[in-house]
Amino acid sequence: MIKNRQPPDYDRFADEFLYQYFPANFIKVRAEIRTGISLLGNNLSVLDLGCGSGASTAAIVQAAREIGVNISGIVAIDKSPAQIEVFRDTTEKWIKMVFPNVSVDLVQGDVLDRLADIEPSGFDVKLSSFLTTEISQRESDRISSFVGSGGLVLDVSSPEGCSKNYGEVVANYEFEKAPIHRAAVREVHPATLVKYFETWRKHDFSQLQALFTPSVVYEISSSKCLRGFGELSSYWEENSREQRDVCWEILSCYMSNNTTQAEWRSVFERIDKSCTYVVLGRLEFTEDAGLISTFRESYTRKSYAAR
């Protein structure tokens, strides 16, 4: 996170930021967004708050192109004239090569000053890239409230050390090297998803009935299917005897109607095997009256000898 929440001089160092951060942001957003936009239908509209030179918008365009989804309109806002100029001279031209009929509206100005002129429900995808790390908590809450009205929300922000983590992702594609930061979970994630991971972290069985329906169907990596609350409770109790010091992070989250999809990462100690597990997974669940009725997850893991 930027110290004292003061942004760098994006006008003075426009070329440097383009060189250093554009590829990393592009790769991260493209990886996270593909599943989400596939749930939204066709002819999508995109709002990018704090767009910079357009890395995140370009990633969404590329992801849409790969899965055959059309982007019909883009509104991108940034207060840096130099960043907007780079967006217009490079990213916008490429976007219009991909989607010749797309409408691109680049707005130079302070995002907070422009919110009153925008109807957030008119956009299918709303994103911000490190914007909330450079403003006050009150301003960040205002933006979170603004973008949280429907559609797909992607907040590309991380806590201290994020640039190092991005570099590792770009160079090595090795998820286990980047440290877990629970603070990376932001308010835009649905409450049920956060409650699920916190229940796992605490092994708090009293919360299971507040999460799942009595007839829940819970599938694990296509190898195990639990049916009903009794089987699920037994499975969680077994995990509580084998795991401790669970840390978790939501890497990406997509919501459509009553369905939630997420990519996640966790680290925990496996007590019975005297080792540490690093796990990367995906999950999908549907809700019925606020409770999870179907749940599917798959994951890969690596183990390391306990120190």
Image: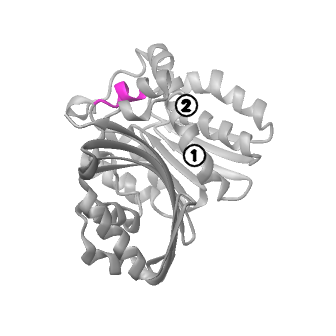
Q: Residue at x 49, y 50 (%)?
A: 299
Is residue 98 visible in the rendered structure shown here?
A: yes
Count of residue discs: 2
Q: Element at badge 2? A: helix
Residue 204, given in percent of the width and then of the height, sits at 24, 70
Give the amino acid type for the residue marked by disc 1 in the picture.
Answer: Ile
- Left or right: 91 in relation to 198: right
- Left or right: 57 in relation to 235: right
Mark pair 2, 1: CA separation: 11 Å
Front-lying residue, 233 or 210? 233
Dot 1: within a 10 Å radius of its alpha carbon, few (fewer than 14), some, or many (20 or more) residues?
many
Residue bearing the label numbered 2: 26
Residue 297, given in percent of the width and then of the height, sits at 50, 59
Q: Dividing the picture into quarters, in which one does residue 175 lie?
A: top left
Residue 271, given in percent of the width and then of the height, sits at 23, 51
Front-lying residue, 301 or 157? 301
Please say if 304 is above or below 206: above
Q: Residue at x 75, y 47 (%)?
A: 70
Q: Residue at x 80, y 41 (%)?
A: 101
Give the amino acid type for the residue marked by disc 2 in the picture.
Answer: Phe
Residue range corresponding to the magenta coloring: 161-166
Dot 2: within a 10 Å radius of its alpha carbon, few (fewer than 14), some, or many (20 or more) residues?
some
For the rendered model, the colour scheme is one colour
For marks 2 and 1, the one nearer the N-term is 2
Direction right: furthest residue:
100
Residue 120, given in percent of the width and then of the height, sits at 52, 58
Q: Residue at x 42, y 23 (%)?
A: 167
Q: Element at badge 1? A: helix
Mark seen at residue 33? 1
